[in-house]
Amino acid sequence: MSLTAHIGPVAALIAGILILLMPKLLNFIVAIYLILVGVIGLFGTGWLRV
């Protein structure tokens, strides 16, 4: 059995913990998420196979 972690759930878990610890980080985390989703949406994943 292969144990592989997908980046989405792991990133969501880390972001959730950080937001609970430091609520002022919410703006930065959301901004970074939106930028990453936009860039991946425009250029595709290419070298990033997730």
Image: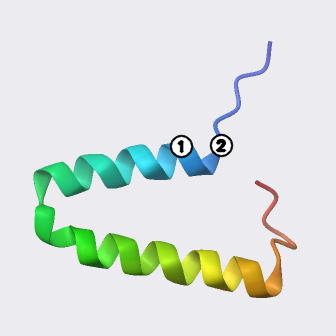
Q: Circle 1 sits on which residue?
A: 9
| Residue closest to the eye, 48 or 9 | 9
Q: Say left or right for 4 vs 34.
A: right
Residue 33 at x, y percent in the picture:
48, 72
* Viewport quadrant of the C terminus: bottom right
What residue is shown at x 81% (from left), y 71% (from top)?
A: 45
Residue at the farthest right position: 46
Task: Classify 16 as above or below 30.
Answer: above
Quadrant for residue 44, please give it. Answer: bottom right
What residue is shown at x 21% (from left), y 56% (from top)?
A: 19
Q: Say left or right for 23 vs 49.
A: left
Q: CA distance from mark 2 to mark 1?
A: 6 Å
Tell me if label 2 and label 1 are in contact, CB under 8 Å.
yes
Q: Circle 2 sits on which residue?
A: 6
Residue 5 at x, y percent in the picture:
64, 36
| Residue closest to the eye, 28 or 49 | 28
Residue 7 at x, y percent in the picture:
61, 50
* Viewport quadrant of the N terminus: top right
Q: Amino acid at mark 1?
A: Pro
What residue is shown at x 50% (from left), y 78% (from top)?
A: 34
Q: Residues within 10 Å of mark 2 (few under 14, many from 20)?
A: few
Task: Classify 8 as above or below 33.
Answer: above
Q: Residues within 10 Å of mark 1 (few under 14, many from 20)?
A: few
> Residue 41, labelled with which disc?
none
Q: Amino acid at mark 2?
A: His
Task: Classify 50 as above or below 36.
Answer: above
Label 1 secondary element: helix
Residue 32 at x, y percent in the picture:
44, 78
Residue at the farthest top position: 1
Quadrant for residue 42, please give it. Answer: bottom right
What residue is shown at x 53% (from left), y 43% (from top)?
A: 9
